[in-house]
């Protein structure tokens, strides 16, 4: 059974750091790209970052570039999101998601349960 | 940056057909997919690559595309289909979500 379990969320002061983790099971993690997506309270889905299957390619939404870093440890079947210089607008539920696209497309076929990040000012 | 546009809300009577659109510049050259999000739950992929339905998704969910507009159609809409629906495309190495459409089953 495919499972993605996010963790590491919590309440943090503005300007501080937090690291999210996403433990994966049920599929060959090292074969797939992975994403982080967030949803702020009462708002829509916002894509945050993507990493390729081997971590060699990464991309970010403009609002987190230079502050957030996506990474993965294929030996531990775990995806990470290091979040620095957090702002109130980063408050959201953060989801990790598995990518199932090939060449010219990307879509997320499996999603984790989400972990909540609250940034207090 | 690339944008796709969805109507904020759509209403449908039980048993009727609901259609949710997603429009964007040159969307005809890209693949669209659709997610269903219910309150307090994680998103669920319901359509990918414009028209493909993942296993486990009911047949009443279908996707289509004409020109620069992708459409999610729910035939014989049920009360359980009430949710927010998001279209998503891949553009220049980034993921772009539409603003979401709240489907109300009256």
Image (tube, coloured by chain):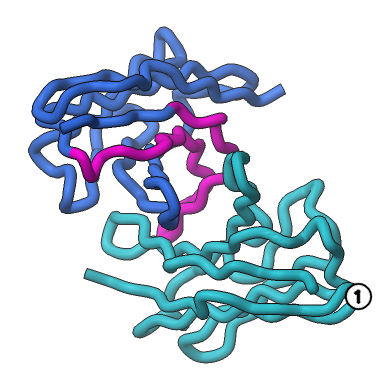
**Is residue A109 at all visible to an observer of this figure?**
no
| In magenta stretch: residue A107 | yes
Q: Nearer the viewer, residue B33 or A41?
A: A41
Question: Color of chain A here?
Answer: blue
Q: What quarter of the picture does the C terminus of chain B occupy?
A: bottom right
Helix, strand or loop for disc 1? loop
Query: Label 1: few (<14), some or many (≥20) within 10 Å?
Result: few
Identify the residue at image location x=72%, y=22%: A1
Identify the residue at image location x=50%, y=52%: A107
| In magenta stretch: residue A93 | yes
Rendered position, A17 above or below B29: above
Rendered position, A55 above or below B90: above
Q: Chain of mark 1?
A: B
Give residue A47's position: percent from left, percent from top.
35, 49
Q: Which residue is mark 1?
A: B15
Rendered position, A75 above or below A50: above
Rendered position, A86 above or below A21: below
Question: Color of chain B here?
Answer: cyan
| Quadrant in the picture for residue A74 | top left
Read off the magenta span.
A88-115
């Amino acid at each position: 059974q495919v499972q993605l379990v996010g963790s590491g969320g919590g309440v943090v002061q503005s300007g501080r750091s937090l690291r999210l983790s996403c433990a994966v099971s049920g599929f060959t993690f090292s074969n797939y790209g992975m994403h982080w997506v967030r949803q702020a309270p009462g708002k829509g889905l916002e894509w945050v970052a993507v990493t390729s299957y081997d971590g060699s390619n990464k991309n970010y939404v403009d609002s987190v570039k230079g502050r957030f870093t996506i990474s993965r440890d294929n030996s531990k079947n775990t995806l990470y999101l290091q979040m620095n210089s957090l702002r109130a607008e980063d408050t959201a539920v953060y989801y990790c998601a598995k990518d199932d696209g090939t060449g010219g497309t990307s879509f997320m076929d499996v999603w984790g349960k989400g972990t909540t990040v609250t940034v207090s000012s | 940056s690339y944008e796709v546009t969805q109507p904020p809300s759509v209403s449908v009577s039980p048993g009727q057909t609901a259609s949710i659109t997603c429009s964007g510049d040159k969307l005809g050259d890209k693949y669209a997919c659709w997610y269903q999000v219910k309150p307090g739950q994680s998103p669920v992929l319901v359509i990918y690559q414009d028209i493909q339905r993942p296993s486990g998704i009911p047949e009443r969910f279908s996707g289509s595309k004409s020109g620069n507009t992708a459409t999610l159609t729910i035939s014989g809409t049920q009360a359980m289909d009430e949710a927010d629906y998001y279209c998503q495309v891949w553009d220049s190495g980034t993921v772009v979500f539409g603003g979401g459409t709240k489907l109300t089953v009256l």
